[in-house]
Image (cartoon, rainbow, N blue to C red):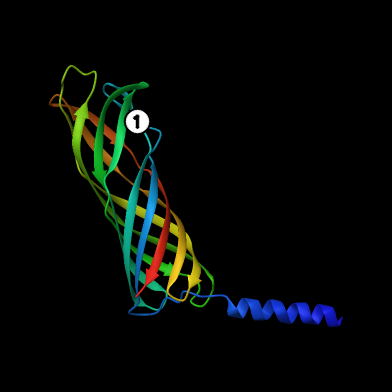
Amino acid sequence: MKHITALTLAALMASTAAPALAQEQGDILLGLGLGWIEPDSGSNTLVGKVDADGALSPTITIEYFVADRVGIELLASWPFKHDLNLAGGDIGETKHLPPTLSLQYYFTNNSSITPFIGAGINYTYFFDEKTNNLGGASLDLDDSWGLALHAGADFALSEKSALRADVRYIDIETEATVGGTNIGDVDISPWVFNIAYVMKF
């Protein structure tokens, strides 16, 4: 019985000593990470099924807490580059920037593991579109606005830093024009998986 009591006391002391990354009004979180974007399986267009492959890029987030456990976060990144495929064949490539603004809620304020959820709006800017194997035809992808959902958890390393693992679903749909002809909408709508080092100021 004494051994059980001692083990219980030790466990309580250990949990009390674990670092916590509290989220209080006025705090700022800066996250530096690496994100993998995995697009939707593809879209049917006038010329066939068009899809984009996955891409990896550095990410940065900055979040301001408007209240305890409630933050407004801006996601930015280095441009993601995607190869575009038509019926399994390479037809070109594009780059895009997907800045995303989210309102986020953290489920606890004094724990070493802090899960959170968020929702917001995404704007995706496409550029450097190029075509391959299309006889030199031009490619143009319209910019996109859409809903973004976010969930993840912070694993505290200290009272001022944490390791973050998170996932987003972003609604990205763009109108594609090839050689001046509108071929329809391409639904990219990716899952974005991210690992980041987060610092509190």
Judged left or right of residue 96, residue 70 is right
Q: Residues within 10 Å of mark 1 (few under 14, many from 20)?
A: many
Provide residue 44's location: percent of width, then percent of height. 33, 27
> Of 4 and 150, which appears nearest the observer?
4
Q: Is residue 141 visible?
A: no
Q: Secondary structure at mark 1?
A: strand
The residue that disc 1 covers is 51
The N terminus: image quadrant: bottom right
Instruction: Evaluate whether residue 187 shows in this view.
Output: yes
Report x, y in % for residue 147: 32, 52
Residue 132 % position (x, y): 23, 22
Q: Is residue 19 above or below residue 117?
A: below
Q: Nearer the viewer, residue 104 or 80?
A: 80
In the shown orientation, is residue 145 left or right of residue 165? left
Q: Is residue 11 left or right of residue 125?
A: right
Query: Residue, x 20% and y 33% (percent of image)?
Result: 129
Q: Disc 1 marks which amino acid?
A: Asp
| Residue at the farthest left position | 180
